[in-house]
């Protein structure tokens, strides 16, 4: 089944406006982006407008790291889906583990955010993953399944066509410790199996499922060689244009 590889760079709370401009200019000059792979940048909110202008008409997509579920109103400090779209965003993350653990976002909140993204026409990238403790206790399937059930509550098969899932084991995020390609493949197969059982075989076969957690230019090829891994959510290694470009190139040649 043809699933277009997606490489997303999650900058987290990094890069000022000038740094954003410098990254986009340097990354564009490397000319790594082709039709083979979809490349997506997820800068902080303050850089979205600038990045949107610089990326308009290029093959690099823009997305945000978070959104609020309401359309507008008295929600100090929050950003709506329409505001993101006005900056040129087409994607938005939902349920990143840093939002879940550092900002206490629970599954019902992730579900509301994901539903708001879908309602507005943004494509949500739903992040799921287990802690080190859950991993050691052999509770990966139980943990991932419970997140999928709660986060995708009331999402129908048609809406599933707009969703990307990112499997990010929490113990691998920012730690330099990557899940082995086989381990990542096994959990991603489990997610695909859940989608098939809950929705249908076709939905599961076309669904893009990414891996995230200490992806770098060196481990990209072995991970993308796994038949169920459809791309990456890259944190630290997406901050440098050269390293992010090497990941895109490695994913192109390996996919
Ligand atoms: P990392 O982050 O690549 O720095 O581990 C991945 C993520 O949090 O999306």
Image: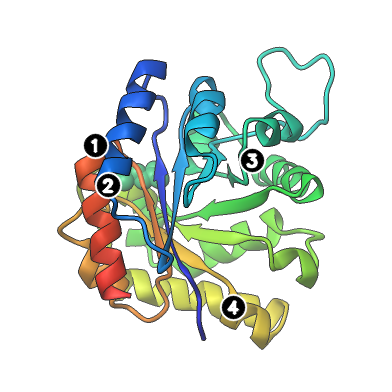
Q: CA distance from mark 1 to mark 4?
A: 31 Å
- Rendering coords of residue 248 (x, y %): 30, 57
Q: Residue at x 56, y 25 (%)?
A: 49
Question: Is 91 on the left-hand or right-hand side of 80?
Answer: left
Relative horizontal placement of residue 251, taking residue 89 as reference (left or right): left
Q: Which residue is mark 4?
A: 206
Answer few, some or many: residues within 10 Å of disc 2's Cα (few below 14, many 20 plus, some between 14 and 19).
Answer: many
Q: How many residues crowd around disc 1 within 10 Å: few (fewer than 14), some, or many (20 or more)?
A: few
Which label sits in the foreground, 1 or 4? Answer: 1
* Residue 27 seen in render: yes
Report whether 134 appears left or right of 225: right
Gap between marks 2 and 1 measured at Cα: 6 Å
Look at the picture and state if 16 lies above or below 125: above
Disc 4 residue: CB within 8 Å of ligand 1:
no
Find disc 2 in the rendering and name its residue.
Answer: 244
The image quadrant that residue 165 belongs to is bottom right
Q: Nearer the viewer, mark 3 or mark 4?
A: 4
Q: Which residue is mark 3?
A: 106
Give coordinates of residue 92: x percent, y percent.
Answer: 60, 43
In the rendered image, which quarter is residue 194 located in? bottom right
- In what element is the residue under mark 2? helix
Alpha carbon separation for disc pair 3 and 4: 28 Å
Q: CA distance from mark 1 to mark 3?
A: 31 Å
Dividing the image into four equal quarters, which quarter contains ligand 1? top left
Q: Is mark 3 within 8 Å of ligand 1?
A: no
Distance, label 4 to label 2, CA atoms, is 26 Å
Residue 168 at x, y = what percent? 41, 54
What residue lies at 20% left-to-right and 43% top-to-bottom? 242
Q: Which of the marked residues, 4 or 2, is nearer the chain's N terminus?
A: 4
SS at circle 1 = loop
Q: Which residue is mark 1?
A: 240
Q: Are marks 1 and 3 in contact (CB under 8 Å)?
A: no
């Amino acid at each position: 089944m043809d699933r277009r590889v997606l490489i997303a760079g999650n900058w987290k709370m990094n890069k000022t406006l000038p740094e954003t401009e410098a990254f986009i200019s340097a990354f564009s000059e490397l000319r790594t982006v082709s039709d083979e792979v979809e490349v997506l940048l997820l800068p902080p909110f303050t850089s979205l407008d600038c990045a949107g202008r610089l990326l308009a008409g290029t093959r690099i997509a823009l997305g945000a790291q978070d959104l609020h579920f309401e359309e507008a109103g008295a929600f100090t400090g929050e950003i709506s889906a329409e505001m993101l779209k006005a900056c040129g965003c087409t994607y938005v993350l939902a349920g990143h583990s840093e939002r879940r653990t550092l900002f206490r976002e629970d599954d019902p909140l992730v579900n509301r955010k994901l539903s708001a993204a879908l309602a507005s026409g943004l494509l949500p990238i739903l992040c799921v993953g287990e802690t080190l403790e859950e991993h050691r206790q052999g509770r990966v399937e139980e943990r991932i399944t419970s997140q999928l059930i709660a986060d995708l509550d009331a999402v129908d098969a048609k809406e599933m066509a707009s969703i990307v899932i990112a499997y990010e084991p929490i113990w691998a995020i920012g730690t330099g410790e990557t899940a082995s390609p086989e381990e990542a493949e096994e959990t991603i197969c489990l997610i695909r199996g859940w989608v098939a059982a809950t929705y249908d075989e076709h939905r599961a076969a076309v669904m893009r499922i990414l891996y995230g957690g200490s992806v770098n230019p060196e481990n990209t090829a072995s991970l993308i060689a796994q038949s169920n891994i459809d791309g990456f959510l890259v944190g630290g290694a997406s901050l440098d244009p050269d390293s992010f470009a090497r990941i895109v190139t490695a994913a192109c040649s390996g996919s």
